[in-house]
Image: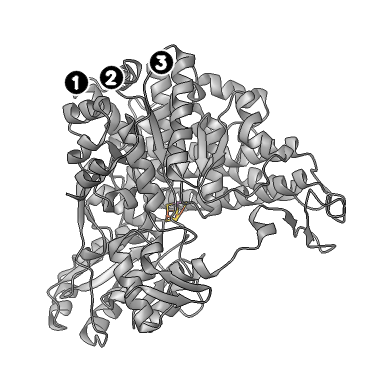
């Protein structure tokens, strides 16, 4: 079983995913005659012109399809060059990604305001210590003020993240001073998210900004308005309202579904609906209802980014990442999948129909044709969650589908934060980043890498994430993770302290001393901002340069697919991080725009982009960059790059 004919030929299911549970379900789906995204991703041959962003659809004189090598296709009808077209397309991608995160952040801010004003009764300010620290970080005096006063002042300050038309975005105060100065000098200091996204869209209209250098400035400002704006607001206020995570043992993979329970999956990005569901499933009325329907109880699990947040904060089991959201329905055991915003595939509707599962949309900004819509209202969460529970319980009571749940679960530690990194390395008495810096300077830790982002059905699910991270830790690079990538590595069993022997000797020693895994899971995609704050704290702790670009650090989204990923990549680059994308990149090699992204920005003192498909090649590029930075800091030592060998693979499998 496994070699099935898809539209484009025979392809083994084993080539579509390295997640065993997803593989089992893909094979079952093929037997059942149901097509999943994992096969659609193989059958879809992308347009070769669109893939490298050489087409322009910004007006109706075209669409224009450019080929820089063909003298008759060098420019569009309006005369736009390949550099202008690539920059405009990239700018609109970044605008969409930044808008998504800022929209998320703005809604979290709205919930915070509802709590302050007493309109929202079902949520509260959970972490007052974090409230105080965050308020102080943006210059709010907290001494002698009560919680609500500080919260009100913080709300008013953070509102500027979205509404400012002039000035500087509040959270940029947390970046190293040298970097802020550079942003000011280069005219890319973000003002407010709404104005940045609006200006990005306006500049890319036909006949407006047609200089890729000038467009790059607005692209950068729009991206920085994500990382130091909406995403950071989402993370910090979510911690304040729902609790700051700390390391928690949690279960990951499809085996977290329980055949004898009512299974409800929450998949999406905004934590409020998930928190509301969590409160509702403990209601004894519904537990009794579930029992009356023949279930042993109600089993609430997460997927994708909101799943990663709930796992970090509350240890809620996580059923899988982006590449598994359709496959998990094939179990027949999902009584309801409840979704909110972002990364929700429309294909879920058809798979849900085939397996008699309720697919329930809950957010006014994300309806899906064919799904059931039950709107979530933060002021009255139970109105939505009670209906979801009733539907899921009724579906359990009348299950018709044969159930097949892959019996695969991995345990791992999740819920690291920049606060916890400071605490665990610095000790209880006085948290500090100095011990981390010291271990980098003495070479035990060679550098730090952020490996993040999506899975993409163009490639074998999880495979690049896992191979890359294994090679990085083997070379003493401490890996920080978020989002779907974190789930890939959790499924591979690397988010446990017992994985320390897979690391190089220096990193292994640090992990064993502190009792941490060599791979630290930080949460969802907006939680990439925890990496920005950690990097800024490393600069402030001293000994590793004046700005983030000086750090021996690199980032990667090896299986990226979304516009949000491009926005994240660009804000990391403009914060000083070398950022490598797998799969491919939407620009033609050696165009002026491409060279600016991949080289010119670094010459201006920022990070730069890189791209490669092979995980070992990516690791080589990241490690070479880390070594270059170590050399510039004068802390380099000659070391050989170590490749992951067969005995390492056996260690991992055992
Ligand atoms: Ni982020 Fe990609 Fe989506 Fe989360 Fe997963 S696909 S860019 S990791 S769920 S946002």
Front: mark 3 or 1: 3
The furthest residue to the front: 646
> Quick one: SS at disc 1?
loop
Q: Which mark is residue 636?
A: 3
Q: Position of residue 306 (x, y in %)?
A: 36, 55
Closest to the observer, 117 or 482: 482
Nearer the N terminus, badge 3 or badge 1? 1
- Residue 456 shows in the view: yes
State left or right for residue 268 relative to residue 596. Answer: left
Query: Which residue is under mark 2?
Result: 435
State left or right for residue 210 relative to residue 349. Answer: right
Closest to the observer, 451 or 280: 451
Nearer the N terminus, badge 2 or badge 3? 2
Q: Tell me the quarter of the image containing the N terminus.
A: bottom left
Front: mark 1 or 2: 2
- Mark 3 neighbour class, 10 Å CA radius: few under 14, some 14 to 19, many 20 or more: some
- Mark 2 neighbour class, 10 Å CA radius: few under 14, some 14 to 19, many 20 or more: some
Mark 3–mark 1 distance (CA, rounded to whole Å): 32 Å
Task: Tally the marks.
Answer: 3
Q: Quarter of the image holding residue 16?
A: bottom left
């Amino acid at each position: 079983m496994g070699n099935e004919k898809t539209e484009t030929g025979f392809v083994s299911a084993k080539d579509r995913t390295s997640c065993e549970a997803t593989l089992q379900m893909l094979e079952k789906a093929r037997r059942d005659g149901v097509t999943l995204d994992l096969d659609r991703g193989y059958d879809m041959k992308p347009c070769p012109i669109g893939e490298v962003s050489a087409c322009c659809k910004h007006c109706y004189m075209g669409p224009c399809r450019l080929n820089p090598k063909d003298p008759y296709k060098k420019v569009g009808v309006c005369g736009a060059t390949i550099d202008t077209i690539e920059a405009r397309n990239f700018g609109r991608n970044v605008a969409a990604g930044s808008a998504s995160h800022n929209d998320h952040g703005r809604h979290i801010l709205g919930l915070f305001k509802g709590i302050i004003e007493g309109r929202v009764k079902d949520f509260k300010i959970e972490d007052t210590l974090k409230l105080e620290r965050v308020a102080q970080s943006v210059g709010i005096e907290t001494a002698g003020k009560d919680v609500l006063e500080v919260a009100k002042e913080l709300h008013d300050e953070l509102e500027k993240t979205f509404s400012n038309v002039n000035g500087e975005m509040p959270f940029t105060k947390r970046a190293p001073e040298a970097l802020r100065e550079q942003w000011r000098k280069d005219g890319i200091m973000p003002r407010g998210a709404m104005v940045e996204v609006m200006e990005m869209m306006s500049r890319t209209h036909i006949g407006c900004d047609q200089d890729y250098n000038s467009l790059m400035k607005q692209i950068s400002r729009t991206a920085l308005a994500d990382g130091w704006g909406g995403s950071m607001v989402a993370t910090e206020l979510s911690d304040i309202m729902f609790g700051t995570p700390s390391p928690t043992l949690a279960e990951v993979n499809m085996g977290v579904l329980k055949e004898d329970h009512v299974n409800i999956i929450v998949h999406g990005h905004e934590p409020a609906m998930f928190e509301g569901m969590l409160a509702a499933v403990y209601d004894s009325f519904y537990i009794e209802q579930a029992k009356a329907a023949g279930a042993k109880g109600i089993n609430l699990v997460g997927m994708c980014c909101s799943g990663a947040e709930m796992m970090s904060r509350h240890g809620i089991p996580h059923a899988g990442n982006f590449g598994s959201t359709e496959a998990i329905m094939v179990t027949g055991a999902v009584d309801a999948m409840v979704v909110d915003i972002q990364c929700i595939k429309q294909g879920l509707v058809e798979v849900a129909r085939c397996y008699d599962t309720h697919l329930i949309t809950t957010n006014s900004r994300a309806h899906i044709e064919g799904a059931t819509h039950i709107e979530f209202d933060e002021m009255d969460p139970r109105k939505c969650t009670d209906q979801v529970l009733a539907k899921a319980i009724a579906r359990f009571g009348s299950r018709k589908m044969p159930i097949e749940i892959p019996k695969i679960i991995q345990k791992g530690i999740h819920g690291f934060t920049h606060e916890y990194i400071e605490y665990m390395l610095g000790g209880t008495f006085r948290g500090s980043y100095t011990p981390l810096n010291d271990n980098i300077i003495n070479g035990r830790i060679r550098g730090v890498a952020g490996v993040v982002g999506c899975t993409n059905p163009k490639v074998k699910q999880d495979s690049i994430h896992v191979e890359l991270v294994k090679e990085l830790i083997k070379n003493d690079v401490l890996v920080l993770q978020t989002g779907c990538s974190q789930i890939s590595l959790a499924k591979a069993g690397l988010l446990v302290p017992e994985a320390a022997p897979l690391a190089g000797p220096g990193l292994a020693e640090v992990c064993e001393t502190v009792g941490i895994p060599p791979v630290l899971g930080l949460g969802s995609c907006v939680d990439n901002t925890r990496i920005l704050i950690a990097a800024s704290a490393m600069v402030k702790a001293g000994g590793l340069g004046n700005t983030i670009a000086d750090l021996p650090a690199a980032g990667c989204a090896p299986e990226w697919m979304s516009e949000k990923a491009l926005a994240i990549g660009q804000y990391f680059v403009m914060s000083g991080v070398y950022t490598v994308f797998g799969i491919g990149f939407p620009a033609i090699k050696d165009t002026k725009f491409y060279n600016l992204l991949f080289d010119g920005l670094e010459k201006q003192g920022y990070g730069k982009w890189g791209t490669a498909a092979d995980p070992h090649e990516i690791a080589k590029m990241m490690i070479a960059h880390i070594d270059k930075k170590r050399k510039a800091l004068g802390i380099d030592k000659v070391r050989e790059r170590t490749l992951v060998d067969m005995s390492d693979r056996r260690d991992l499998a055992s």
